[in-house]
């Protein structure tokens, strides 16, 4: 399809823009690009369960935090860095698959509450298990040598690579039987069951996919920053921000999470720079307005309609654009 | 033609204190059209739910093609070739009509690729007279259209047994005639059909055999012309007036 191809082209352009930031932008922007790539991976991951399947999951921070700790602990026990990321990925994936088999029996709001509870439970376990995790003191990791600029470039490449892999998995899911089944579940789970979709298995796989790469970026983040603690790793803000980003862009689409993450980060930067005291409040209000008036996200808008309305100004537009 | 495809063996289902289906045994033969009738709350839909795996029988067994399928889940029933339409239509509302039907083809028995499933879906829509609506969202269809969509989706699953739960409820006379024609064509393809109906006109014109359910019990079973004369059936469901009219029709025609 034409629109799909355009989405892929836009993604490639975006990847190039992020990847070349060290050549043309300040260190601050490079750091921002790393965070955008990381959050895009988280949002693309959430999209599997929250977008395609329509299950409002709030467990992103649990997966990310477990990834941080699994990676950090592996590295501290002498495992090479990249291998530690692999271990973190597998650990978080296995955790999500086991957990999904239990909590995906819940539907709708109950699932949302259950999934948010997991973040708290995991955070409490990690902060109380001081002998293993260092508790509230956190953990230090060996820093890469070469100075902050070189390290930033390495982690920019790593985060972008993980983002691209997640995007490719999203495209594959979007185009085959599995994605089709997830959409059926999202629209009418009973009817999906009746046409032969193994709904439980599909949901568990979607939940597994929504966790897998969160584990990878968590571990990579830990290696990049060099220090993790429970509050930073299992932050409730992250668990809310990721779904909001996806909803802003367009849940259940391939490019929506990418667009949403970019747009949200941009807004955050604008409000952070200009309204130091009230930025969170303003951001909150903006989120509410966007979710109310853009239920399908930025990609859900019919830009042809908007163009038509702009061309004929006597008809007042209904959508805030 | 007369091989048995589905057997229920003393099947019961209780919901708390309510005995929804009580000790029901019957068999369906391959390729026949059987009607399941009875008053509201007789347990007709529950019986269908038992056969499609939505509920598990509290007692008894169900066999499909000589295989015990008592504890199956709905998606397993679908893959085995047991399809059903819902009394209250269950589309995927934001998918196009074509995508709805393709879902049936994609996850039903044969499991083709997405592209092949869409081709099968197009064929089915042609057959159902819905081809012009293929790219509209399912929510844009009229009630009659949605019922046909349900049928098309079930047929795309290439079922061996199709259960139609009041596909004609809420349709007008000409829409019913259209639906009857389609159901007959489906039966001609060798699909066994169980119709749940309140409209006796439909039952009389379609089904050779009738099962009558009352308070969860199978109170009568037999050829349609015999059943409409059965005293228990008249008392429980049809009413004396209707029975006289049918008797007059049979005598006159």
Image (cartoon, coloured by chain):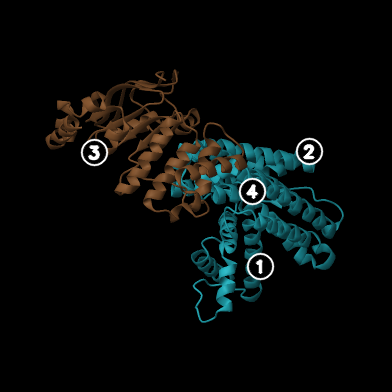
Chain colours: A cyan, B brown
Residue bearing the label numbered 1 = A266
For marks 1 and 4, give the CA distance: 22 Å
* CB within 8 Å, label 2 to label 3: no
Q: Which mark is residue A255?
A: none
Q: For mark 4, name the chain.
A: A
In the image, residue A43 above or below residue B194 = below
Q: Residues within 10 Å of mark 1 (few under 14, many from 20)?
A: some
Instruction: Name the image quarter holding the C terminus of chain B.
Output: top left
Q: Secondary structure at mark 1?
A: helix
Tell me the mark number nearer the camera, choosing from 1 and 2: 1
Residue bearing the label numbered 2 = A78
For marks 1 and 2, give the CA distance: 39 Å
Q: Which mark is residue B40?
A: 3
Pointer 2 and pointer 3 on the same chain: no
Q: For mark 2, name the chain.
A: A
For marks 2 and 3, give the CA distance: 70 Å
Q: Residues within 10 Å of mark 2 (few under 14, many from 20)?
A: few
Q: For mark 3, name the chain.
A: B
């Amino acid at each position: 399809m034409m629109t799909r191809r355009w989405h892929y082209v836009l993604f490639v352009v975006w990847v190039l823009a992020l990847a070349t930031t060290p050549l043309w932008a300040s260190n601050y922007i490079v750091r921002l690009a790393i965070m955008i790539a990381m959050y895009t991976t988280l949002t693309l991951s959430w999209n599997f369960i929250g977008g395609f399947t329509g299950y409002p999951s709030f467990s992103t921070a649990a997966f990310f935090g477990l990834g941080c700790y699994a990676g950090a602990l592996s590295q501290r026990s002498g495992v090479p860095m990249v291998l530690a990321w692999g271990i973190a990925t597998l650990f978080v994936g296995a955790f999500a698959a086991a957990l999904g088999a239990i909590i995906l029996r819940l539907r709708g709001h109950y699932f949302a509450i259950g999934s948010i509870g997991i973040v708290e439970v995991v955070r409490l376990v990690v902060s109380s298990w001081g002998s293993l995790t260092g508790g509230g003191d956190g953990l230090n990791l060996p820093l890469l040598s070469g100075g902050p600029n070189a390290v930033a470039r390495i982690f920019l490449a790593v985060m972008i690579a993980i983002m691209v892999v997640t995007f490719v998995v999203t495209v594959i899911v979007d185009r085959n039987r599995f994605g089709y089944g997830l959409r059926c579940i999202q629209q009418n789970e009973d009817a999906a069951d009746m046409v032969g979709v193994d709904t439980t298995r599909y949901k568990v796989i979607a939940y597994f996919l929504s966790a897998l790469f969160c584990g990878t970026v968590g571990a990579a983040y830990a290696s990049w920053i060099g220090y993790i603690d429970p509050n930073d790793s299992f932050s409730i803000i992250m668990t809310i921000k990721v779904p909001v980003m996806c909803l802003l862009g367009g849940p259940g689409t391939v490019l929506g999470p990418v667009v949403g993450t970019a747009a949200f980060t941009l807004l955050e930067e604008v409000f952070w720079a200009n309204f130091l005291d009230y930025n969170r409040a303003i951001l909150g209000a903006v989120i509410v307005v966007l979710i109310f008036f853009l239920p399908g996200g930025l990609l859900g808008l019919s830009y042809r309609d908007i163009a038509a309305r702009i061309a004929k100004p006597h008809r007042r537009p209904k959508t805030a654009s | 033609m007369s091989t048995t495809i589905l057997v229920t063996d003393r099947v019961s289902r209780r919901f708390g204190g309510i005995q929804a289906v009580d000790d029901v045994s019957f068999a369906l033969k391959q390729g026949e059209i059987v009607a399941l009738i009875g008053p509201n709350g007789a347990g007709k839909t529950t019986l269908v739910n038992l056969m499609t795996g939505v509920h598990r029988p509290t007692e008894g067994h169900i066999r499909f093609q000589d295989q015990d399928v008592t504890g199956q889940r709905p998606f397993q029933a679908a893959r085995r070739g047991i399809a059903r339409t819902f009394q209250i239509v269950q589309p995927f509302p934001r998918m196009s009509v074509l995508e709805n039907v393709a879902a049936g083809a994609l996850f039903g028995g044969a499991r083709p690729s997405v592209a092949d499933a869409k081709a099968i879906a197009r064929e089915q829509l042609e057959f159902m007279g819905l081809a012009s609506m293929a790219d509209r969202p399912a929510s844009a269809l009229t009630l009659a259209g949605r019922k046909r969509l349900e049928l098309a989706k079930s047929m795309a699953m290439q079922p061996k047994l199709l259960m139609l739960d009041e596909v004609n409820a809420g349709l007008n006379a000409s829409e019913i005639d259209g639906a009857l024609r389609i159901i007959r064509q489906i039966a001609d393809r060798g699909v066994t059909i169980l119709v749940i109906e309140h409209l006796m006109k439909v039952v009389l014109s379609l089904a050779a055999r009738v099962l009558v359910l009352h308070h969860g019990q199978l109170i009568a079973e037999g050829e349609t012309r015999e059943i409409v004369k059965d005293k228990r059936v008249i008392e429980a469901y049809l009413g004396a007036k209707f029975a006289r009219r049918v008797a007059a029709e049979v005598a006159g025609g």
